[in-house]
Amino acid sequence: MIHRGEIVEKVVRSSGMPLSRVAARMGKSRRWIYNAFETADLSLDLVIEFGKILHYDFSQDIPQIAGHRPIVGDKPLTYGENSVDYWKDKYYSLLEEHNQLLRQISNQSGK
């Protein structure tokens, strides 16, 4: 059996993100993070949460994640091109809104 806690620990430590920041983003203590690293059967929901924070796809290391649906009312995670397309579309949408606001401000000050 793979030790999920050790896999997560390896990724967290190699990410360069301080443990205190990871703990804060999860709403947990540093001690809780250390305990998670020692847990062989760390829940898939927690592994996915670590993955979100670290922007890491654990499905390569823990194959069970591929078919796992988060318990919380979260949308299923997508990795790879789907995720890139989502963020690209989000960026263009926000850029378009920003440009519209600039045009409105420009029109108001030109009157």
Image (tube, rainbow, N blue to C red):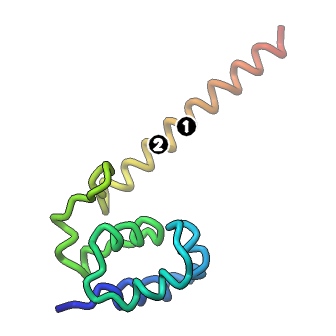
On residue 90, which mark appears? 2
Q: Is residue 34 above or below residue 109?
A: below
The amino acid pointed to by label 1 is Leu
Q: In the picture, residue 57 is in which quadrant?
A: bottom left
Q: Callout 2: few (<14), some (14-19), or many (20+) C-alpha neighbours within 10 Å?
A: few
Find numbered disc 1 in the image and state the secondary structure of the residue it sits on: helix
Q: Which corner quadrant holds the N terminus? A: bottom left
- The answer to whether 54 appears left or right of 84 in the picture is right
Q: Amino acid at mark 2?
A: Lys
Location of residue 93 in the rendering, given as x and y in whole percent from the top left corner: 50, 35
14 and 93: which is toward the camera: 14
Q: Which disc number belongs to residue 64?
A: none
* x and y percentages locating residue 82 in the rendered image: 30, 53
**Residue 72: quadrant of the picture:** bottom left
8 on left or right of 53:
left
Residue sitting at x 69%, y 22%: 103
Disc 1 to disc 2, C-alpha distance? 6 Å
**Is 93 drawn above or below residue 38 in the view shown?**
above
Q: Mark 1 — residue?
A: 94
Q: Is residue 103 above or below residue 88?
A: above
> Do labels 1 and 2 touch, CB within 8 Å?
yes
